[in-house]
Amino acid sequence: MLIDSHAHLIDRRFAKDLGAVLDRAKENGVEVIINVGYDLESSFEAVNLAREYDFIYTAVGIHPHDAARVPEDYLGKLKEFCRHTRVIAVGEIGLDYYRKLSPRLTQRRIFREQLALARELDLPVIIHDREAHQEVMEILSKDKLPQAGGVIHCFSGDREMALACISMGFYISFAGPITFSKANQVHEVVVQVPLEKILIETDAPYLAPQSKRGQRNEPAHVRFVGEKIALLKNIPFTKVAAITTANAKNLFKISP
């Protein structure tokens, strides 16, 4: 069995055939999907979707792209969402200095406020980090991880950063880019990171694996990520599936 630890099923690209997408996920051994919000509206929709499907859980949060557009009472709204029993994390939150859709100072403030909320509620965090490695690490070092832990989603740093994150208590999550033939740095990280600290994800509908490039990504494709990890580590795929599933259940407190 597999867990897709990060997908965006509320994306409009799933509006017409979500049922078929979920059927394909189950056919490919996906036991659980963590459906991740990125603003207040998507977080609300993600909570509602989790009410419909018992194998979907939810994370709620403000993505750095949307940091400049949050209302003053956004933390209160997120806290209200977190009361729902199927909300298992605050995320995705963090910094993105690639797209530059929100000012850096605003991104940092919203990131730190949501970290504080996660510590208050004792929920794990799902961290987005794109071309902001140094500042993400500085904030995490100063503000500290919630007792419940967290994961660096779609990890793109180097070996040293990965080991530093693990020493803080983070899991490291890998997505479709590890299947790319020229992704040498992330391949090295996969080899170096203990399997007991790894999660797998799709980030669907984004980041399709090599064999699906140019297509919409979906949770069924998380299998390709697990298979690539097995190849890089020279271990059976069944071992990758079992341990990454146990890791996700441990982090997000998902009962069997």
Image (spheres, rainbow, N blue to C red):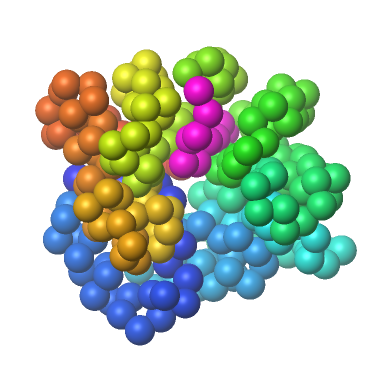
In this rendering, is residue 240 above or below 96? above
In this rendering, is residue 42 above or below 158? below
Q: Is residue 152 visible?
A: yes
Quadrant containing the N terminus is top left
Using residue 188 as the reference point, say whether residue 150 is left or right of it.
right
Q: Position of residue 83 (x, y in %)?
A: 62, 58
Q: Please give the name of the residue rendered at 48% of the width and 71% of the height, measured from the top-left corner.
A: 11
State the residue in front, 205 or 44.
205
Pick out the residue farthest to the front.
182
Q: Position of residue 33 (x, y in %)?
A: 36, 55
Residues shaded magenta = 148-158
In this rendering, is residue 76 above or below 176? below
Using residue 55 as the reference point, say whether residue 240 is left or right of it.
left
Using residue 231 as the reference point, say whether residue 157 is left or right of it.
right
Q: Position of residue 32 (x, y in %)?
A: 32, 53
State the residue in front, 180 or 25.
180
Q: Please give the name of the residue rendered at 23% of the width and 25% of the height, measured from the top-left corner.
A: 232
Majority secondary structure of magenta residues: loop
Q: Position of residue 126 (x, y in %)?
A: 56, 43
Does residue 153 belong to the magenta stretch?
yes
Q: Please give the name of the residue rendered at 71% of the width and 40% of the height, measured from the top-left corner.
A: 115
Using residue 79 as the reference point, say whether residue 47 is left or right of it.
left
